[in-house]
Image: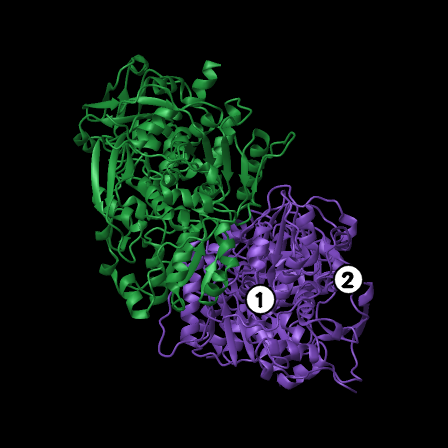
Chain colours: A green, B purple
Amino acid sequence: MGQTLTEKLLAEHLVEGELDTGEEIGIEIDQVLLQDTTGTMAWLQFEALGLDEVETEIAAQYCDHQSYQFDFRNTDDHAYLKSATGKFGAYFSRPGNGVCHQVHHERFARPGQTLLGSDSHTPTQGGIGMLSIGAGGLDVASAMGGSPYYLETPEVVNVRLTGDLPEWATGKDVVLELLRRLTVKGGVGKVFEYTGPGVETLPVSERCAIANMGTELGATSSVFPTDDVTREYMEKLGRPEDFTAVGPDPNATYDDRIEIDLSTVEPLVATPSMPDLVVPVSELAGEPVDQVIVGSCTNGAYEDLRAFCDTLGDEVVHEDVHAIVQPASKQASELLARDGTVAKTMAAGVNWSEATCGACCGVGHVPGSDSTSVRTFNRNFEGRSGISDDNVYLVSPQVAAAAAVEGAFVDPRDYGTDRGIDDPGYPEPDRFDGSNRDLIAPPEGDVELQKGPNIGTVPVNDELTDDVAGDVLLRVGDDVTTDHIMPASSDILMYRSNVAKIAEFTLTRIDESFPERALAADGGFVVAGENYGQGSSREHAALCPMYLGVDAVIAKSFARIHEANLVNFGLLPLTFADPDDYEALEAGNRLRLTGLRESIARDEDETELTVVDETTGEEIPVILDVTERERKYLLDGGRLAHVRASQ
Amino acid sequence: MGQTLTEKLLAEHLVEGELDTGEEIGIEIDQVLLQDTTGTMAWLQFEALGLDEVETEIAAQYCDHQSYQFDFRNTDDHAYLKSATGKFGAYFSRPGNGVCHQVHHERFARPGQTLLGSDSHTPTQGGIGMLSIGAGGLDVASAMGGSPYYLETPEVVNVRLTGDLPEWATGKDVVLELLRRLTVKGGVGKVFEYTGPGVETLPVSERCAIANMGTELGATSSVFPTDDVTREYMEKLGRPEDFTAVGPDPNATYDDRIEIDLSTVEPLVATPSMPDLVVPVSELAGEPVDQVIVGSCTNGAYEDLRAFCDTLGDEVVHEDVHAIVQPASKQASELLARDGTVAKTMAAGVNWSEATCGACCGVGHVPGSDSTSVRTFNRNFEGRSGISDDNVYLVSPQVAAAAAVEGAFVDPRDYGTDRGIDDPGYPEPDRFDGSNRDLIAPPEGDVELQKGPNIGTVPVNDELTDDVAGDVLLRVGDDVTTDHIMPASSDILMYRSNVAKIAEFTLTRIDESFPERALAADGGFVVAGENYGQGSSREHAALCPMYLGVDAVIAKSFARIHEANLVNFGLLPLTFADPDDYEALEAGNRLRLTGLRESIARDEDETELTVVDETTGEEIPVILDVTERERKYLLDGGRLAHVRASQ
């Protein structure tokens, strides 16, 4: 029986366990990336773990979320990150050099290797055949120190592509189509592996956009084979030697299969406020638009900006639209500045920002009240833009450009016809030969760590007690995102290195009183619906509830990275044996779990526990589905506590 | 006896009063400019005054301080400003189009005309012979409605320039030299009028930089004559018809005279944390630098950015420096993008921001803790950068570039010699022919005002009572700036349209408890040293103390715009008859003023009042030096209350 590409990549990096779906394995990590809002905690944990040198082939720290540096805490974070990379041996990418995934893609990503990143969109590099996975900062710090990365062997779903995209349809539309079909829960526990004759019709930028938004499907990763398209692309990157041919065996068998005929894909839009609320753009034609932003790790590459600019053509931005380009890499800006595109589009009314994640994580260009924002990003979770009740639509660069000119949604096919503008395709430059001045290799000699007053320490949980009792502090619905648990707008992000402070914002998007109540209660439960913790990899979404004293989250199901983060910080991720019991556990009910240490110490696939609801007298069966390794973490109070206890 | 240029410009616009130094006059205003953090309140006041159409030749609203829109309140402010300009008949400059003074300079400024701006650096246009004055928003709103602007006839000080600037010295260094000699109080009540053979050696950009920082001298305005240099410059702007020859009579007599031999000027630096703490850059050579920012209304023009880039030459930014260009106009970026300069300097490690005031008002790129920031701006007041205990140095673009490359302060003459780089001079383009896409003329037809939830109303003070009693709520020292009274960092600026909220930050840079105490006391006094309220034109520095219930400020002296703002909002600006009495009025002392209405109603040059200190029993003589017009405002509770009472 032939192997899938995913199996091959896993097998080549396997250091612990066996490749059986659902079983935990440990894999070797070749490369690591970190961004600034997760990186500070990761490096603090690297220190706290007693590590002193980066062991992976490549580790790179990017300053991308906070590149505008609205607060001195952001700037201090960057200074700490520069000092930590210098001391421990990682690359440092200066603020303004671009978004981690795009810059890593341009400079380091290699087919056939593994990449672990402290950002949920790390799978972007699946577009060039790299097995790339997002994880919490503690897992990334451990991997940097040479530890394997542990994950459950994923199901591998074959997405077979046939046909060829019609004019004005893009990779973004392909993944929006998948989201429409599968929803944001459709990829949990899975790797999406793309095959079929449609693959070779897609340039690398489109493959990466698709792999990037696999994260919105909840997938562990997404991966494309490499081919001549990849080879030529890596030559343009100036790294032909990094190309490797990778792909599945012809007779590989998959856990599931999805077919997409590319010729049937049309320009799509994810409507507010979930990436799977997808409709054809034609359904929205004529709806006025106030703001258009192009950028992000999904659609901020040279090819995306070029497509946006070419779709503008000789038209100009509508008087009522504020149009901003936030490039995903400075190289992209540099190339487009060099060939006159920046000057031309500035004249057309476009603003060019420093390269940044920016508005995608609510930092800068927050939409106004009752306004419509059209963005080429990957997430439109409610409030993520920085204003509650926002109306954020996710589109391709082509759809964004047409809306910027029209002042309203317009089907780009109609736009092209009406204005005599051709589909720009996916225009690559002859060479990606921008300067690499802002990516700094670690210097020779000793570097002193630089910690501003906001750089805190890593809190460590106590050992698990045998009995845990507390109230249901909060009950939330389905699909609660990490943006709900730990918002990411600029007024909050600046406290990412200071857990005591940032914990004050935990779950406040749902209930403003939560942090105060949780801290006062000193213990308790969060009850949740399906897919709890979807979205970002931010471990603060576990670290802060821990800091506030939360003992466990009882959910219908969890998002992968968030569940791992909960375990890493010693919180029990419990699932309902019967999802209908969700209704029974009302906020304020007093719950108790007993005999925990003995139960959790048992080496078994799943541990059944009983939650006694002391308010109603009901007994609710719940399941703890963790590995032997994770049981040790939980008993000791989390991964960091475990490492310390083992020393 | 011949007339000075200032007298001519005043005389040509005189509609009330006589041109006697110190006497109040009313002048007609030809053009008005507003920026976003003062503009919302100005337009709300325009509404509250019952005005319905802009009466000046030109009124232009710029969105420059908050162009990053890091909060929805900023974006809502911009939406309101767009709707107000559309409704009432002003130009709207979109966020990202640039800084009010620079864009106004490029598009509208005309020699021989008057300009009133709701920004303290409005005198920038003095560089091309325009009489341009900064004022509070209420005065600007009134002028837009056709009212005269009232001011005391200023002293006119002749700054006679001889010689020619040596290599690597600039207009910035000329005005820093003036600040070194005269201090930040040296220009109060004065207009600086530049003459002499040195004028024609200075290009327009340098004249404007000098006029711009006349504000830091405390001057009412600064003005240059026009000449062939101005004429050619206005041809390059594409507005040759706007040129007028203006200048003083040959036998004009001045109130005072200062001589500067340009050939003796060398590269200078204003050190932390006041623009008059000036030393030669050579004294700082070797001191490490962490951040370099080029931009602002002082040195953000094309010529400045060009000089910065040319000084970089083929060098690159030092690894330890974060170098950012924040252009003062999008046209400047566009021209530099067009000719390849943006691409080249990006490759050298420079970040190009959207055009904005940005870091100059503490919005973005806040320095890190214990770091050194070198900026081409005009103010380095403590904390203005967004972090207290900051170390901000003010320099020319040339000095900034040399520091960016060197990673430390370096005399640009040494830098040039060592690296074989020539003084770039003041390089103008052949034509300023960028697009004007982002400056939007008011549309035909009715426009509806758009007010987000943060857009408040204008509070109006009560009629003055005959007796005023209250505690000294706070006593502050000399040179307290409007940045102390009403800080301007991004976390506060977003409340500029919401007085009740932003009042919570009043004077908190000096005493965190002030707002709460003042509000609870419901009346009271602020006691201050010299030059109280220097800096910005922001009327919030008067409006918010009024909202908190402050009745009067007793100071050794006031900055001009702030004193006018106090009167506009019905607060008594009192000066000590004997400055030594400052020591007697300690915080907490109970003060009383009696018989106020009768005293203030008397038409006299100065009114002597007696403050009874009920705590010590002392009687302190103070002076109210206001005009007949201002007496009416004070009696009614401020200008807005007066207009309403008169209707």
Find numbered disc 2 in the image and state the secondary structure of the residue it sits on.
Answer: loop
| Front one among B441 and A352 | A352
**Residue topped by disc 1:** B119
Asked whether residue A298 is in view, the answer is yes
Crowd tier of the residue under label 1, counting other residues whose Cα lies within 10 Å: few below 14, some 14–19, many 20 or above: many
* Residue B192 vertical position relative to residue B590 in the rendered view, above or below: below
Task: Name the residue: 79% across, 81% down.
Answer: B253
| Front one among B27 and A538 | A538
Quarter holding the N terminus of chain A is: top left
Compute the Cα span from label 1 to label 2.
33 Å
Choose top left, top right, bottom left or bottom right for residue A17.
Answer: top left
Labels 1 and 2 share a subunit:
yes
* Residue A574 vertical position relative to residue B197 in the rendered view, above or below: above
Choose top left, top right, bottom left or bottom right for residue A371.
Answer: bottom left
Find numbered disc 1 in the image and state the secondary structure of the residue it sits on.
Answer: loop
Q: In screen coordinates, is B9 left or right of B99?
A: right
For the image, the number of numbered tags is 2
Q: Position of residue B385 (x, y in %)?
A: 60, 51
Mark in front: 1 vs 2? 2
Mark 2 residue type: Glu
Mark 1 residue type: Asp
| Front one among B120 and B347 | B347
**Residue topped by disc 2:** B167
Q: Position of residue B601 (x, y in %)?
A: 60, 75
Q: Position of residue A131 (x, y in %)?
A: 37, 33
Q: Earlier in the sequence, mark 1 or mark 2?
A: 1
Q: Position of residue A177 (x, y in %)?
A: 24, 48
Most extreme residue toward the bottom is B1
